[in-house]
Image (cartoon, grey):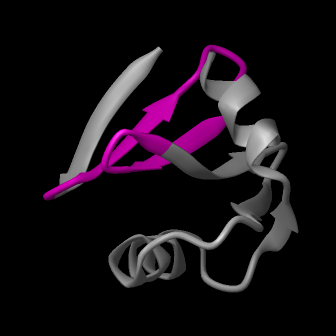
């Protein structure tokens, strides 16, 4: 696993299989899995929503549990 700090309160981890998981604050909220981008369907703060948009743009939505499992 590789940890990368992107900006204040924004972190990305890259797993051994190449999956990238984006964290806003301490919450996994977006990912790139097999070259496809996903974002949480859960509504977070305006700041977290902006972080997600900057990291993955208009990505397919998935339930928050999907990201929680990726980061576990």
Q: Is residue 18 visible?
A: no
The residue shown at (21%, 54%) is 9
Instruction: Specify the farthest residue to the left.
Output: 8
Q: Which residues are magenta?
A: 8-27
Q: Does 16 sit above or below residue 31?
A: above
Q: Is residue 11 visible?
A: yes
Q: Position of residue 18 (x, y in %)?
A: 67, 29
Q: Position of residue 64 (x, y in %)?
A: 74, 48
- Asked whether 49 falls inside the magenta stretch, the response is no
- Asked whether 18 falls inside the magenta stretch, the response is yes
The residue shown at (52%, 30%) is 14
Q: Does 36 sit above or below residue 55?
A: above
Q: Quadrant of residue 7?
A: bottom left
Q: Is residue 67 left or right of residue 20?
A: right
The one of 25 and 8 positioned closer to us in this rendering: 25
The one of 8 and 33 positioned closer to us in this rendering: 8
The residue shown at (70%, 65%) is 42
Q: Is residue 55 left or right of residue 21?
A: left
């Amino acid at each position: 696993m590789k940890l990368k700090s992107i900006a204040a309160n924004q972190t990305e981890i890259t797993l051994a299989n190449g999956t990238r998981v984006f964290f806003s604050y301490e919450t996994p909220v977006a990912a790139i899995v097999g070259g496809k981008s996903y974002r949480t369907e859960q509504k977070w703060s305006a700041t977290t929503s902006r972080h997600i948009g900057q990291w993955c743009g208009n990505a397919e939505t998935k339930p928050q549990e999907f990201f929680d499992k990726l980061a576990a």
